[in-house]
Amino acid sequence: MRNIIGLFMVLSILVILPTVQIVFAAGDEAGEYIDRRVEIWNLFFRMMTVAFVVGAVVSGTLIWLIWRFRESNPKATPTKYEGTGELDR
């Protein structure tokens, strides 16, 4: 549970920091403007980087789980929920 909370904290920081940076990027003096196209592309690029990293981790985890718990794995044993094929009463 602690790992999930830590992951959500990291992901929320990755979302909040670029947003705060855009908010405080506007200057007080006249003549300082933000090019919104550049800022939107920058935010899109950062979010896509995060999405690809999270997707790679999830895909890697799924591949590992499928490979580890495949039926032909010699170390695979039935869990207590699967039983041995007999009716346990």
Image: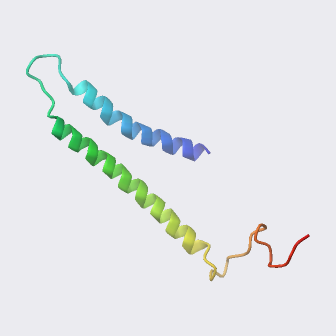
Residue shown at 62% from the left, 83% from the top:
72
Residue farthest to the right?
89
- Point out residue 81 in the picture as x, y percentages from the top left corner: 77, 67
Q: Is residue 47 left or right of residue 86?
A: left
- Point out residue 4 in the picture as x, y percentages from the top left corner: 55, 46
Image quarter in which the N terminus is found: top right
- Point out residue 16 in the picture as x, y percentages from the top left corner: 37, 34
Residue 38 position (above or below residue 28): below
Q: Nearer the viewer, residue 40 or 54?
A: 40
Residue shown at 59% from the left, 72% from the top:
68
Q: Residue 39 occupies which quadrant of the picture?
A: top left
Q: Is residue 42 left or right of residue 50?
A: left
Residue 59 position (above or below residue 76): above
Marks counted in the figure total: 0
Residue shown at 84% from the left, 78% from the top:
86
Q: Nearer the viewer, residue 11 or 82?
A: 82
Q: Residue 35 occupies which quadrant of the picture?
A: top left
Figure coloring: rainbow
- Point out residue 18 in the picture as x, y percentages from the top left corner: 31, 36
Residue shown at 33% from the left, 46% from the top:
47
Residue farthest to the left?
31
Residue 5 position (above or below residue 81): above
Image quarter in which the C terminus is found: bottom right
